Amino acid sequence: MKDVVKIFKALGDENRLKILHIIGTQEICACKLLEYLEIGQPTLSHHMKILCDSGIVSSRKDGKWTLYKINKDTIKHTADYMQVTLFGNTAAQSCCNGC
Amino acid sequence: MKDVVKIFKALGDENRLKILHIIGTQEICACKLLEYLEIGQPTLSHHMKILCDSGIVSSRKDGKWTLYKINKDTIKHTADYMQVTLFGNTAAQSCCNGC
DNA sequence: ATTTTATATTGACAAGTTTCAATATATAAG
DNA sequence: CTTATATATTGAAACTTGTCAATATAAAAT
């Protein structure tokens, strides 16, 4: 459960949610993210660390850049947790698409 | 988006996640919740306020009791947000049940 | 080699959060 | 009407978080 708390904590910040929206399905470097946000570079670095530590985002180095992308599995598992574990629905009873 | 941040903030606390697990599909009073938790009464009241303000839990008075239950819609909408809005999948592309 | 560019780390401060003791309110029971 | 029970509010202490300025690291360009 500690892991899930960590994930929700990471999602519970406006700037980090903005970051995730910007990343979307791309793989993107920190410098590009900075252009869209109204925060300083060390602050962004701090937010990216929190997103990476929680498992929501993964990163790789490419030369002098660090490229970030959203970790699909973590998002899916957490959405599942909400629907199934947290609310007591089995997968058969409820689905986020209504099917 | 502020609403979603509020919800994730509310979910980002170990005691509040425990509370949601205890409530599950029931309707339950604060005094019953207190029995399962290792926190004081004012602290529980504080957590319930946060859960209610975010829309995750709804409450009604019944005599001297306040009964709480999980708000199904909020959970569903937030799980949808994660799958669809946050990660760019359309409802048709991805589903938490894998269908 | 030196400079520029991209990112991370450190240290500090302001703001927010969690918790509890004390107190208040409100309903029910005696 | 007084007492007991259930919950909420207030105020304060300890802890955590978000932010930035300054500095460090590391790769690329000149």
Image (cartoon, coloured by chain):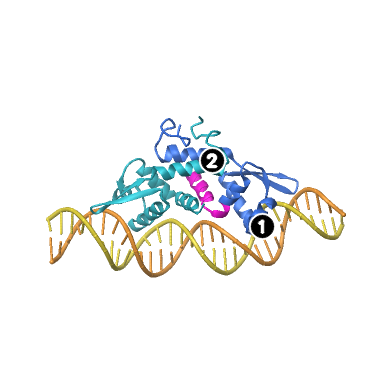
Chain colours: A cyan, B blue, C orange, D yellow
Q: Secondary structure at mark 1?
A: helix
Residue shown at the point (37%, 53%) measured from the top left: A48
Crowd tier of the residue under label 1, counting other residues whose Cα lies within 10 Å: few below 14, some 14–19, many 20 or above = some
Q: Nearer the viewer, mark 1 or mark 2?
A: 2
- Residue under disc 1 on the same chain as residue under disc 2: no
Q: Secondary structure at mark 2?
A: helix
Q: Is B61 placed left or right of D4 in the picture?
A: left
Residue B15: x, y in percent?
57, 54
What count of labels does the image hold? 2
Circle 2 marks a residue in which chain?
A
Residue B99: x, y in percent?
45, 31
Residue B71 in which image quadrant: top right
Crowd tier of the residue under label 2, counting other residues whose Cα lies within 10 Å: few below 14, some 14–19, many 20 or above = some
Q: Can you tell which mark lies on residue B41?
A: 1
Residue B90: x, y in percent?
41, 33
Q: Which residues are magenta?
A: B1-16
Residue B93: x, y in percent?
41, 32
Q: Which residue is mark 2?
A: A84
Residue shown at the point (46%, 39%) measured from the top left: B81
